[in-house]
Image (cartoon, rainbow, N blue to C red):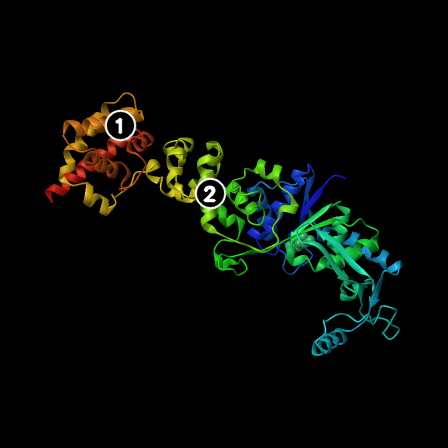
């Protein structure tokens, strides 16, 4: 049988890291098995579902590269199908109309709670209820088996057995005619041919009820893998309080999708003590059995480390594609300086995120109005006048603008003026970058370009002269 998995988010918010990890595991399993992956939008909660959230989820999936063969399906477009099956269960006596008023159900619950019992419907209408008005509103309840137990082997949690007496008769259609979540999920997973359901452990209590519905419908029961929660680094459930939780916020903050995927795959899954996994490796090595049972704690430091790793290791054209987004975002015109492909190898060493890389590369693309005050105070002093003027002359005369030639100019300037390299290098750095920090000078100048470097040194010479005169 072809493996088919799905990701089935409810569009009530953006795609958060917990959802993204569930999607990733489900996707990886399908890919590992040469199977298919389905995206299904569970939008039956009309009050809370929004188009904005649907768009955000799709955008997040696309940014992560979690592609799907089928979908997105929308539950709101399948109401006829759900209702047809509910009618069928009614006709077969596997479901029933329940006329119990809200007051009765509430009172029942209160009494059960007062007695220290679990709140559950008592089956009052299960065998017919003659005492209701002809036009009284009703819901449809599923006739849960009253004996035996539901047993399933969860890929993550092992064997789980629930006594049917623990489960009550679930509402599958509300009084307004709309089908309920637990029913729709079963019908969808059946119709869509889902073989493995990978989802968050918050759904584990629904699974035995859903298995009973599969059986009543005569549908094959899929396998299940319930994935544990993600906690913040303080041990509490991951929330906005811990910083970014939306996948797209990670893009905005300068992370590469490869880094986030690698981070998420390790957050609850392992293969020996390996930390770095390319997407191809994840696909090859992934198994549901190796997912951890225990909750995992989010660790931003590790994510940053992985991000820098991928900034340095991924093909530069790939990194450039994502960096271009940040250039646009920070309104830096990438056509006004070195190619991103040339910039990345030089700057990736010095930045943990693409956002930081873009921000600290502005001087390659734009002239700056002022020198950094502290750097200028320290390095653009009268003693810098001569080395700056000489190195400017040498650089201007170069016909071969290469790192070696640039280095030679700096070196020979220092030698001719009998100065240490730093006495030439530091003023030069401040002159061309505006600040006291940059990659090695030969590479920095190489990227800034000859004309722009020479012009900037000229401005620095002027600055020093003005300062000497003031
Ligand atoms: N729509 C559910 C959620 O977003 C997921 C249901 C499922 O995966 O079965 O939590």
Q: Is residue 36 left or right of residue 455?
A: right
Residue 409: x and y in percent read 23, 26
Residue 232: x and y in percent read 51, 57
Q: Give the mark nearer the N terminus: 1 vs 2.
A: 2
User: CB at mark 2 closer than 8 A to ligand 1?
Assistant: no
- Outermost left residue: 469
Residue 172: x and y in percent read 77, 61
Where's the N terminus, which quadrant? top right
Q: Is residue 442 left or right of residue 241?
A: left
Q: Is residue 49 left or right of residue 409?
A: right
Instruction: Give whichever of 281, 241 is nearer the camera.
Output: 281
Where's the C terminus, which quadrant? top left
| Image vertical order of residue 32 relative to residue 222, above or below | above
* Residue 431: quarter of image: top left
**Tag 2's secondary structure?**
helix
**Tag 1's secondary structure?**
helix
Label drawn at residue 307:
2
Label drawn at residue 165:
none
Would you call the spot at circle 1 few (<14 residues within 10 Å), some (14-19), or many (20 or more)?
Answer: some
Q: Is residue 434 left or right of residue 360?
A: left
Name the residue beneath numbered marker 1: 407
| Quadrant observed for ligand 1 in the rendered image | bottom right
Residue 257 is at least partly visible in this image:
yes
Would you call the spot at circle 2 few (<14 residues within 10 Å), some (14-19), or many (20 or more)?
Answer: many
Residue 178 is at least partly visible in this image:
no
């Amino acid at each position: 049988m072809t493996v088919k998995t799905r990701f089935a988010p409810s569009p009530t918010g953006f795609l958060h890291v917990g959802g993204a990890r569930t999607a990733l595991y489900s996707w990886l399993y399908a890919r590992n098995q040469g199977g298919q992956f389905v995206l299904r939008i569970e939008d039956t909660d009309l009050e809370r579902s929004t188009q904005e959230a649907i768009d955000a989820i799709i955008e997040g999936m696309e940014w992560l590269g979690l592609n799907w063969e089928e979908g997105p399906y929308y539950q709101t477009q399948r109401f006829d199908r759900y209702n047809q099956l509910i009618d069928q269960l009614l006709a077969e006596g596997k479901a029933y109309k329940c006329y119990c008023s809200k007051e009765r159900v509430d009172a029942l619950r209160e009494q059960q709670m007062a007695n220290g019992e679990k709140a559950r419907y008592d089956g009052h209408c299960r065998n017919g209820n003659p005492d209701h008005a002809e036009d009284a509103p009703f819901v449809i309840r599923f006739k849960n088996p009253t004996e035996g137990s539901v047993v399933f082997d969860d890929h993550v949690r092992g064997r789980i057995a629930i006594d049917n007496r623990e489960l009550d008769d679930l509402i599958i259609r509300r009084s307004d005619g709309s089908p309920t979540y637990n029913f729709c999920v079963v019908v969808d997973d059946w119709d869509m041919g889902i073989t493995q359901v990978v989802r968050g452990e918050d759904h584990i209590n629904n699974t035995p009820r859903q298995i009973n519905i599969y059986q009543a419908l005569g549908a094959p029961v899929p396998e299940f893998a319930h994935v544990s929660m993600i906690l913040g680094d303080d041990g509490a459930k991951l929330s906005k309080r811990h910083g970014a939780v939306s996948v797209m916020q990670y893009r905005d903050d300068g992370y590469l999708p490869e880094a986030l995927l690698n981070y998420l795959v390790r957050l609850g899954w392992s293969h020996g003590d390996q930390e770095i996994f390319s997407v191809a490796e994840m696909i090859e090595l992934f198994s549901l059995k190796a997912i951890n049972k225990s909750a995992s704690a989010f660790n931003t430091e590790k994510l940053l480390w992985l991000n820098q790793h991928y900034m340095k290791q991924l093909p530069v054209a790939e990194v450039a594609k994502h960096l271009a987004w940040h250039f646009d975002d920070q309104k830096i015109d990438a056509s006004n300086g070195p190619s991103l492909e040339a910039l990345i190898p030089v700057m990736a060493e010095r930045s943990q995120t693409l956002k930081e890389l873009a921000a600290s590369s502005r001087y390659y693309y734009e002239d700056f109005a002022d020198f950094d005050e502290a750097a200028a105070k320290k390095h653009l002093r009268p003693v810098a006048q001569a080395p700056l003027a000489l190195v400017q002359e040498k650089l201007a005369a170069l016909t071969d603008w290469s790192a070696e030639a640039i280095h030679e100019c700096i070196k020979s300037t220092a030698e001719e003026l009998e100065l240490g390299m730093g006495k030439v290098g530091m003023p030069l750095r401040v002159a061309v970058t505006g600040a006291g920090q940059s990659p090695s000078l030969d590479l920095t100048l190489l990227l800034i370009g000859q004309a722009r470097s020479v012009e900037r040194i000229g401005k620095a010479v002027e600055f020093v002269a003005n300062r000497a005169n003031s």
